[in-house]
Image (cartoon, rainbow, N blue to C red):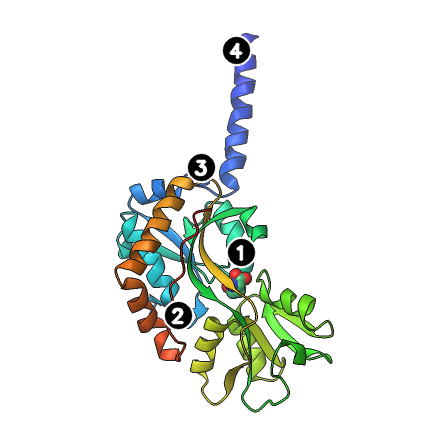
Amino acid sequence: MRINRSIRVGIGALAVAAIASACGGGEERSASESAASGQLTVGIKFDQPGLGLRNPDGTFSGFDVEVAKYVGEKLGVAPENITFREAPSAQRETLIQNGEVDYVVATYSITDARKEKVDFAGPYFIAGQSLLVRSDSTDITGPESLNNGKKLCSVTGSTPAQNVKDTYAQDVQLQEFDTYSACVEALRNGTVDALTTDDIILAGYAAQYPGELEVVGESFTEEQYGIGLARGDDETRTKINDAIEEMIADGSWANAFEETVGPSGFPLPEPPTVDRY
Ligand code: GLU
């Protein structure tokens, strides 16, 4: 009787463990523990030139990639031991919560809603929302001009699209895709009239298609880019905040920016102050 009972309890415990691991292995492990094992998995964008881009030869480039590598080195992991994983806007919280990535550096704005699910180190950059249009279009000059049913593209799970609709243009028609590169194609082939997201992202696409796409108007939000990591992993968050401060102080931050974003013509801004909330 006693044996039977402990077997039953044991089977129950195994079942619970199996369910837990099926929900995404590694969720108990902090990013510092991953780093101590010599490997890190980092979420970045794969389709944002100048920020997070997977090149045709399988290498990765961009400012977010450089920030991710610098932070990795400060956590004790060499760049060749970092595995980059695509983190589309709508999947960033889930990838972190499931332990599928150790941290995310992917044009990821620090917001109160996201802070309910993940924590943020940073900010390491401050961007602002803006608009990208075809160079031959004349009637879109800012977010208000999207009224009258203009078709506006943005990405599911990102902050910008809803902001335009809520704040500036109730009559805009929102079309949401999974990635910004899909929006760029829709803009180029005339399916949408404009694309909205952060100015630094749009500058990369405008530079890809000079004379065809351009950024219009002033930026109209403040987007503080953070490095997302598991909620409550304060040890790693402190280390990442230290790393960001060092990257700014030793000149690597400005160098990385000039090499990655610089060619798009986007000017080097003042570095932000890390917020240890
Ligand atoms: N920074 C904004 C956000 O985190 C837009 C850029 C993006 O979707 O990556 O939602």
Which numbered mark, 3 or 4, is in the foreground of this view? 3
Q: Residues within 10 Å of mark 3 (few under 14, many from 20)?
A: few
Structural distance between the alpha carbons of marks 2 and 4: 68 Å
Front label number (2 vs 4) = 2
Q: Which mark is residue 133?
A: none
Tell me which label, 3 or 4, sits earlier in the chain: 4
Mark 2 or 4 closer to N-term?
4
Element type at mark 4: helix
Which residue is at a point 35% across and 60% down the rendered structure image? 67
Counting from the top left corner in percent of width and height, residue 148 is at 73, 80
Q: CA distance from mark 3 to mark 4?
A: 31 Å
Question: How far is disc 1 from disc 3 in space, using C-alphas?
Answer: 19 Å
Q: CA distance from mark 2 to mark 1?
A: 29 Å
Mark 4 Cα-neighbour bin, 10 Å: few <14, some 14–19, many ≥20:
few
Quadrant showing the N terminus: top right
The residue wearing badge 2 is 269
The amino acid pointed to by label 1 is: Gln
* Image vertical order of residue 242 relative to residue 233, above or below: below
- Compared across the picture, whether 214 is left or right of 38 comes to right
Query: Which kind of residue does numbered mark 2 sit on?
Result: Pro
The amino acid marked with disc number 3 is Glu
Kindly identify which residue carries mark 1.
91
Q: Nearer the viewer, residue 97 or 23?
A: 97
Q: Mark 3 near mark 4, Cβ–Cβ under 8 Å?
A: no
